[in-house]
Amino acid sequence: MIRFLTAGESHGEGLTGIIDGIPANLYLDRNYINEELRRRQGGFGRSERMKIEKDEAIIISGVSNSYTTGNPITIFIKNRGVNIELGEVTRPRPGHGDLVGALKYNQKGGRNILERASARETAMRVALGSVCKLLLKEFDIEIFSHVINIGGIESNLNYYSNISEMELEKVDESVIRVADKNYEAFMIEKIREAKQEGDTLGGTIEIIIKNVPVGLGSHNNWDSKLDGRLACAIMSIPGIKGIDFGLGNRVVSTLGSRFHDEIIFNETYKRKSNNAGGIEAGISNGEDIVFKCYMKPIPTLKKPLETIDMETKEKALAQFERSDVCAVPSASIVAESMAAYVLANEFMKKFGGDFLEEVKSNYYNYVKYLNNR
C-alpha cells in the first residue's frame, strides 16, 4: 500500500512530503520530477509568484544512487520570495477557508488557515505524484490531461471526439494546455478580460489514462471502488468542485441500450465503446480511464466581495492576497499526480512486492492469466 503525507505553508520555509510503499529498485529520475514541477508552475493567468518560484525537489531519504531503497521517500521543496510581512486576515474571503478555519481552530483570523489551505501545497503533491508516475511508466501506464473549458469557452476536442495521443502529447505547447489551438486565443482573451476586471475564472479538465490493466479497484466495499477513490483524490485538490467519469452527466438523457459498452472478444475481452470511462462496478475494465473535473473561479479577487470584519463585526470588503486569475492549466497537472497516486496504490495492492522485479513478475503472471481466459 502506498500512502503519502505533506507538510508546510505557503509562506513558510518550504514544503515537505513523505511517500511510503514505493518498491525498491525503481529508478527515480530527479529531472523528471523537476520537469513535472515546472509544468505545474506554467499556464497563462498565473500570479506574479510564479516568476519568483522555481521549484526543485530535494530528495532527503529513500533513494540511493538514483534508485529507491524501499524505505519511505522524503522530498523537500524550498519556498522562495517569502520574506514579506504577513498580517492577520480578519476580513475573510468568501469562497476560501479563512472564516470556517478560523472558527474551527479558534484563531483570531484566517492567516494560519490560508497558509495551509493555499494551493501552494499542491507543488508537493506533484513531486510525490511524479514518483507514482515513474512507477506506472514501468508498466506503460500513461496519464494525460488537457483543458477543455475556461470561463465558459469550450473546446470541441475531447476523448469522445477522438482526440489523438499525439495531440495529447503536444498539449504542453499551449500556454493554457488546450489541445484545440482554435480555442486558445479566445481563452487567453477571456483570462485577460477577467484580470482587467479584477476577477477570476474556473474551467474544466479532462484526464485520460491509457494502458490500465483489468482488475484495479474492487466491487466489494464502498471505499475500495476505483472510481470512488479517484473521485476522493481529485476532489481534494483546492478549487475542484465536481468530477464525472466517461460520458458524465450526459448519461441522464441517454438510453441504456445506447450507453452501456457492448463486450466483444478479440484475443482478449474488449468493449465496442467506452462510455463508462474505463471503470465498471468500481473495477478497471481495461479500457482507457476517462474523467472530467471542474474547477471553480479562484476566491481571491482584486475586486473583493463583501464580507464581515471578524474584529468589528461590521460590513467590509474581503482582504486581497496575491493570487492567480486562472489556475486551471496548473490544476490539470495536479490532477494527473493525484490520479497517479491512486492508480499506483491500487497497482501495488494487486501486484505488490518489496522490490520492482517482484512486482513485475506478479504483473506479468497476471497478464498471462488474462490472456488464457
Image: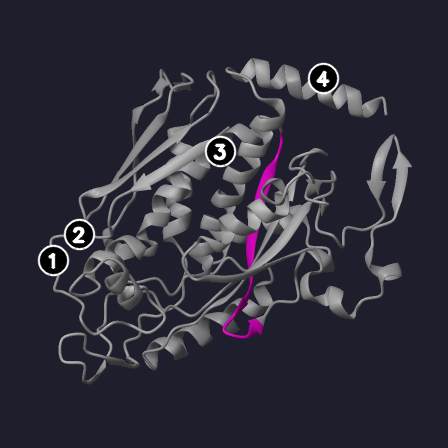
Q: Quadrant of the C terminus?
A: top right
| Residue type, mark 4 in image | Asn
- How far is the residue under mark 4 from the one under mark 1? 56 Å
Q: Nearer the viewer, mark 2 or mark 3?
A: 3
**Which residue is more in the foreground, 38 or 93?**
93
| Residue occupied by mark 1 | 84
| Residue extent of the magenta highlight | 140-153
Query: Residue 28 vs residue 15: left or right?
Result: right
Rate crowding at label 3 as few (under 14), some (14 to 19) or many (20 or more) other CA atoms within 10 Å: many
| Residue occupied by mark 2 | 81
Residue 126 is situated, as x and y percent measured from the top left of the image, at 41, 43
Nearest to N terminus: mark 2 or mark 3: 2
Q: Nearer the viewer, mark 1 or mark 2?
A: 1
Contact (Cβ within 8 Å) of mark 4 with mark 3: no
- Compared with residue 299, is residue 353 higher up or lower down, i.e. above or below? above
Q: Nearer the viewer, mark 4 or mark 1?
A: 4
| Residue occupied by mark 4 | 365
Contact (Cβ within 8 Å) of mark 1 with mark 2: yes
- How far is the residue under mark 2 from the one under mark 3? 29 Å
Say if residue 172 shows up in the picture: no
